[in-house]
Amino acid sequence: MEQQKVFMKDTIAIKTALVFPQDTNMHGTLFGGKLISYIDDIASISALRLCKTPVVTASIDSVDFIKPIREGDAVTLEAMVTWTGNSSMEVLVKVTSEHLMTGEKSLAALSFLTFVSLNEDGKPNPVPKVVPVTEYEKWLHDTGEERAKHRKTRRLQSKSLIDLISSKN
């Protein structure tokens, strides 16, 4: 049986929110934790669009805060599945801020996350392959396996550190 395939563009999910005073820190910029919550939320929707099964966040590679997002700005997050393994998928989230009075937009943050598809027993479940079409999509897809290798190495290092810390208690 041939593995199911899904075009990358069909996994795109977009969320826009207004940054209110209660969303900001003492510098008048969006709390990092609030942004990470938005990132995880929109990335999970993208992952669900690919596999149509329950998913869990396995890792957040990093969140690179490139430009502050200020109170009164609109923040738009665009997520897309960029690479798939057997039961896992990588999702890129691009975060753009928009000054609503001037219309100026800026890339504010980037993040790669990994999700795992689960079956009805909560065990890893095979996922469809994601298919790139544009040059941008092809680059993201072609470089995804290297990022996955880095994640596996980092995970092993984290497990070693957890073992070390656990043995001290």
Image (cartoon, rainbow, N blue to C red):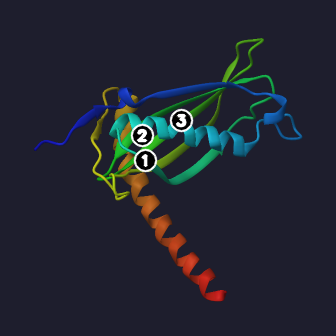
Label 2 – label 3 distance at C-alpha? 9 Å
Locate residue 75, reporting x and y percent: 67, 27
Locate residue 82, reporting x and y percent: 39, 39
The residue shown at (71%, 46%) is: 33
Q: Residue furthest front?
A: 120
Label 1 – label 3 distance at C-alpha? 12 Å
Q: Amino acid at mark 1?
A: Val
Residue 55 disc label: 1
Q: Nearer the viewer, mark 1 or mark 3?
A: 1
Q: Amino acid at mark 3?
A: Ile
Dot 2: element: helix
The residue shown at (56%, 43%) is: 40
Q: Amino acid at mark 2?
A: Ala
Task: Work out which quarter of the rendered image holds the C terminus and state it.
Answer: bottom right
Figure check: 142 above or below 58: above
Is 128 placed left or right of 91 in the picture? left
Which residue is under mark 3?
42
Label 2 – label 1 distance at C-alpha? 7 Å
Nearer-the-camera pick, 143 or 79: 79
Res. 65 in view: no
Which residue is under mark 2?
47
Figure check: 17 above or below 164: above
Figure check: 40 above or below 95: below
Q: Residues within 10 Å of mark 1 (few under 14, many from 20)?
A: many
Task: Work out which quarter of the rendered image holds the N terminus and state it.
Answer: top left
Locate residue 6, reporting x and y percent: 28, 33
